[in-house]
Amino acid sequence: MEDDRLSRWRRGFTTRSAAETERAGEELAGLLPEGATLLLGGDLGAGKTTLVRGLARGLGVEGDITSPTFALLAVHRGSRRQLLHVDAYRLAKPADLDGLLLDELARPPSNTVIEWPERVAGREPPGAWRLTIAAGTGDERRLQLAP
Amino acid sequence: MILAVESSCDESALALLAPDRGIVLERVSSQVELHRPHGGVVPDIASREHLAALPLLLREFAPRLGEVSTIAVTRGPGLPPCLSLGLAFARALAASTGARLVGVNHLRAHVHSPFIALHAENPAGFAAARRALLPHLGLVVSGGNTLLVRLGEDLGMTVVARTVDDAAGEALDKGAKLLGMAYPGGALVERAAQGGDATRFAFPRGIPERADLRMSFSGLKTALRYRLEGMDDAAVAAAMPDLCAGYQEAVIAQLEAKFRSALESGAYRSAGLSGGVANNRLLRARLAGVCARRDLPLRVAEPMHCGDNAGMVAFAALAEPGLPEGEAAAAEPSLGVETA
């Protein structure tokens, strides 16, 4: 069952509304191994924060999930796991990721999401999952997890 | 005298405030020419930039350290390594001067910042003058925050409304990016919007229900993205003033509407505007209009106290009782506006 769901993510699928993208994020929370980092790629307005909002719900986080672009980092306590939400958009260079001290902030069980992973190329944690979200026609979004 | 240290994000800053006069000296690293081969400071998230900048800024303050009785330092919200460095710097100053150390909440300092000038006008009469303006509704709007806060007669703060996703300043900055401008480009959108027709392109108003005070700005950039996909480069260039005016209008109309609804739902004796986006002239004018119709004083923070700065941190140490002192002034990266 879990393998079926995971293989659907690997093949890729399309959501047709922001609410559906959020539900997909919630499902992903159940598939992501504890401790794993999710590298979340996609253009401005693609729906990355919407997906993270669903993921946060799935990890038992209550309250608003606001964009951490300016602050670079938001730490959320969830009833299932902690979520470290990183937005690398403003990082000047990949090595700046080290300056966020993610390892010190992590209180396992936890997961980390990094938006704009191309800004931290070469510094990704080993074993990170890579998800791309791409805009289609209208509210359609194509989600695919790299193998 | 109060010496304040700010290092919560990109800017390193120091300020000196005399309780009987107001702010007497303040410096922000981005304004200061650091004597390096490649010129001034490059804003960087890394705490090493604060480590380099703070001691250089301190040189100008050093002759007056003997007069300092309180060191105020931003303890949150902000980036953990940057906050820790600022606190370590402030603790060292407190230890070497014998001054007491107080921790300041950066967001609460923004809420207090529209009162800085009120204090400077008449320091002795400040407490009474402020009391006459409470309760106060403050709109803090920046690249990282969009909050309506009630400052009560007991100086307690309550969140009245906030964004559920992007900050208003972020919506402007990211809109600028989608329009091909530099990032962050909120101020460029304002400039390009001048003379534009704000009615030609309609953009969504977040959460339009009047009774719902929540704000939302993330759908706006998606709407702009859809709009631009249907236009070629020449059409975008030709329509730039109208696109910018329409987009900016959507941000400001939402802020204005929620500000007005919040004023209607509470008894306030003044309102305030602060944070980086408070420098937007259209926003200032629109909120001034709302307040003028209600005969309510609107206090707007001075431009130098809208972005990250230490002047407001020094002022918060004066304006707010019960701040955490000494060891209790610990770094708190996720500090909310309702906690001192």
Image: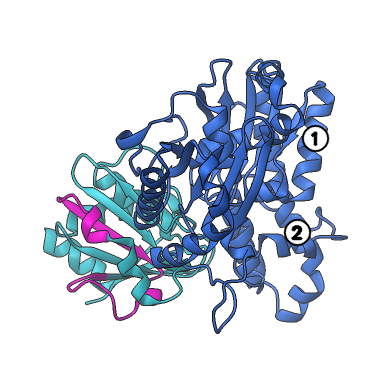
Q: Is residue A59 above or below residue B152?
A: below
Secondary structure category for the residue under label 1 = helix
Segment tinted magenta in the rendering:
A102-129
Q: Residue at x 15, y 59 (%)?
A: A33
| Residue receiving disc 2 | B190
The answer to whether tags 2 and 1 share a subunit is yes
- Tell me what hue chain B is rendered in: blue
The residue tagged 1 is B288
Q: Nearer the viewer, residue B146 or B60?
A: B60
**Dot 2 lies on which element?**
helix
Amino acid type at mark 2: Glu
In this rendering, position of residue B76 left or right of residue B2: left
At 62% from the left and 45% from the top, the residue drawn is B275
From the rendered image, report the letter of the chain displayed in cyan.
A
The chain holding disc 1 is B
Q: Quadrant of residue B288?
A: top right
Compare marks 2 and 1 and give the one earlier in the sequence: 2
Q: Position of residue B251 (x, y in %)?
A: 67, 48
Q: Residue at x 30, y 52 (%)?
A: A55
Q: Residues within 10 Å of mark 2 (few under 14, many from 20)?
A: many
Task: Say which amino acid is labelled 1.
Answer: Ala
- Counting from the top left corner in percent of width and height, residue B54 is at 48, 60
Q: B31 or B334: nearer the eye?
A: B31
Asked which quadrant contains residue B260, the reply is top right
Q: Chain of mark 2?
A: B
Would residue A96 appear left or right of B315 to someone viewing this image?
left
**Mark 1: few/some/many CA within 10 Å (<14, 14-19, 20+):** many
Residue found farthest to the bottom: B37
- Residue B306, visible in the rendered structure: no
Depth check, front residue: B86 or A121: B86
